Amino acid sequence: MKILKLTFLLLLIFTTSCSDDADDKIITNSDPKYNTVEIIEADSDLFQYLVEIATDEEQPELSIACINFIYPLTIYTFNETNEYVSTTVIEDDTQFSTFLEAIDLTYSISISFPITSTLLSGDEVIINTKEELKDAIDYCLDEELILECSTLIQNCVLKVGYSYNYDNTYLGGIFIEEDGATNFTMDGILFNGSWTVFIIEHELHININLINADETGDFFNYDWKVEYIDGNSLLLTNENRELVLNQRCDANFEECSNFIFEECETQVDSGISEFILDDYTYCIFDTLELEDTFEISYYLTEDDAVNMINALASDIAFINTEDNQSIYVRIDDLENNIQYYAIITLASISC
């Protein structure tokens, strides 16, 4: 996704140091103006960055949008034994992309430095070495991560999702980002606060701070490392803590709040209710964001769920035998032959 990026710090470009390394330099007599050139291997991260910068705008999800080259560029190509092969003058992104895609993975290239690039802000920067180029792109990608995550947070609500590995006390809680403030709502209780998205050593982080939140604050108020589960889901971790946040843009995001399912008592003060487990299947799929290829089944014990025995009939009434009875849910990813397990609670209430 092409997202408008913050302006590069020019200081980053001009203060980056470069050391001569015999392993990444070769000598060529192909052009008397450039006796020593710095090579970029076709199987390196920097080469892949160049591919993403040059990628056509028709594929923005594959491109790096925050830096563009000013053409023409002169590119030298070398074979697997570092022998000069050819010189190519590149005139535009399309030609550059085509050229890079055709390079053999055992080959190397070198850009004729210095080169000039332009930022989306319109500012131009001069890059003198491949180290400066790598640093500039790294900085650009850090800014891209921050803006991408901030956009995900601000566009819609974030709903606390199910963690298979940690406490789900706040399952179904809702974070809403608005005008720089962050509100968290759980069971009708509102907490105010804020959070900050930032980068530490190229890792994405979110710092959450809910004020006057007592136990809720004890759960959320940490510096969380952030990873993307998919395009709309984040996994936040801090030491052994884990928090899943799912972006929800649909109007009925509150239909399924958590995994506590309530039914009225069959008799007053009996503590007994009838539960049709199939009635909860939709919410389990919705909360866990499962694909249609998944299948779920219900069990009284964890051992039964793991061994797939004594499954409960989900289409007829289940009579609870204890207050707030736990039911184990087995989730089968049929496509990948993977199993997951979750716990729901059946609560009998007075109505």
Image (tube, rainbow, N blue to C red):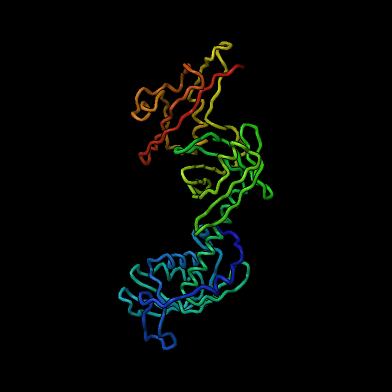
Along the viewing direction, whichever of 126 and 280 lies nearer the viewer: 126
- Residue beneath the point at 53% across and 72% down: 69
Farthest residue to the bottom: give it. Answer: 32
Specify the quadrant of the image occupied by residue 11: bottom right
Residue 67 image offset from top left, x and y in percent: 55, 67
Along the viewing direction, whichever of 105 and 172 lies nearer the viewer: 172
Query: In the figure, is residue 110 to the left or right of 260?
Result: left
- Residue beneath the point at 42% across and 64% down: 45
Query: In the figure, is residue 338 to the left or right of 74?
Result: left
- Residue beneath the point at 43% across and 29% down: 329
Along the viewing direction, whichever of 213 and 348 lies nearer the viewer: 213
Specify the quadrant of the image occupied by residue 148: bottom right
Residue 204 image offset from top left, x and y in percent: 52, 54
Viewport quadrant of the C terminus: top right
Residue 22 image offset from top left, x and y in percent: 36, 77
Residue 97 image offset from top left, x and y in percent: 46, 68
